[in-house]
Image (tube, helix red, strand yellow):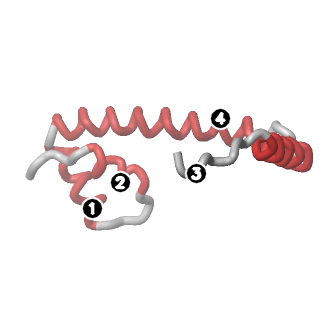
């Protein structure tokens, strides 16, 4: 059996229910040192990504957004940009 690619190992990490794919990966991990090495690498990447996403979620909860003020600023910028727009010169 050929070694699993990174995407196949990542799929294994995302699955939680028993499946034929999980059984194949687990079988390969018990018998192939290269798959175990690749799995450790995929597991480390998976852990880093989950930590980053967790940090973003935590940071997101602590920031208050003034949506009304943001909308006012966007509308003001849009209005200012249309005020200074030069009409296209035709026939040149």
Viewer-closest of 12 and 55: 55
Relative side of 9 to 70, left or right:
left
Residue at screen point 35% across, 53% down: 12
Mark toward the start of the polypeptide (1 vs 4):
1
Q: From this viewpoint, which residue is outermost toward the left?
A: 1
Label 3: state its secondary structure. Answer: loop
Q: Kindly check if marks 1 and 3 are in contact, taking CB atoms under 8 A apart as contact.
A: no
Q: What percent of the width, then of the height, locates residue 79?
A: 83, 46
- Residue topped by disc 4: 55
Disc 4 to disc 2, how far (Cα)?
23 Å
- Residue topped by disc 1: 21
- Residue topped by disc 3: 90
Q: Above or below — where is 65 with respect to 20?
A: above
Mark toward the start of the polypeptide (1 vs 3):
1
Residue at screen point 40% across, 33% down: 44
Front: mark 3 or 4:
3
Q: Residues within 10 Å of mark 2 (few under 14, many from 20)?
A: few
Viewer-closest of 85 and 23: 85
Q: Kindly check if marks 2 and 1 are in contact, taking CB atoms under 8 A apart as contact.
A: yes
Q: What percent of the width, then of the height, locates residue 73?
A: 85, 41
Mark toward the start of the polypeptide (3 vs 4):
4
Q: Residues within 10 Å of mark 4 (few under 14, many from 20)?
A: few
Label 2: state its secondary structure. Answer: helix
Disc 1 to disc 4, how far (Cα)?
31 Å
Q: Above or below — where is 39 with respect to 7?
A: above
Front: mark 3 or 2:
3
Front: mark 1 or 3:
3
Mark toward the start of the polypeptide (2 vs 1):
2
Q: What percent of the width, then of the height, locates residue 18?
A: 36, 65
Disc 2 to disc 1, how far (Cα)?
9 Å
- Residue topped by disc 2: 11
């Amino acid at each position: 059996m050929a070694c699993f690619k990174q995407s196949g190992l990542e799929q294994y990490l995302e699955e939680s229910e028993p499946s034929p794919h999980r059984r194949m990966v687990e079988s390969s991990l018990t018998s192939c040192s290269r798959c175990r090495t690749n799995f450790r690498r995929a597991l480390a990447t998976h852990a880093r990504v989950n930590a980053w996403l967790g940090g973003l979620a935590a940071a997101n909860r602590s920031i208050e957004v003034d949506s009304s003020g943001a909308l006012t600023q966007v509308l003001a910028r849009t209005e200012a940009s249309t005020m200074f727009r030069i009409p296209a010169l035709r026939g040149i």
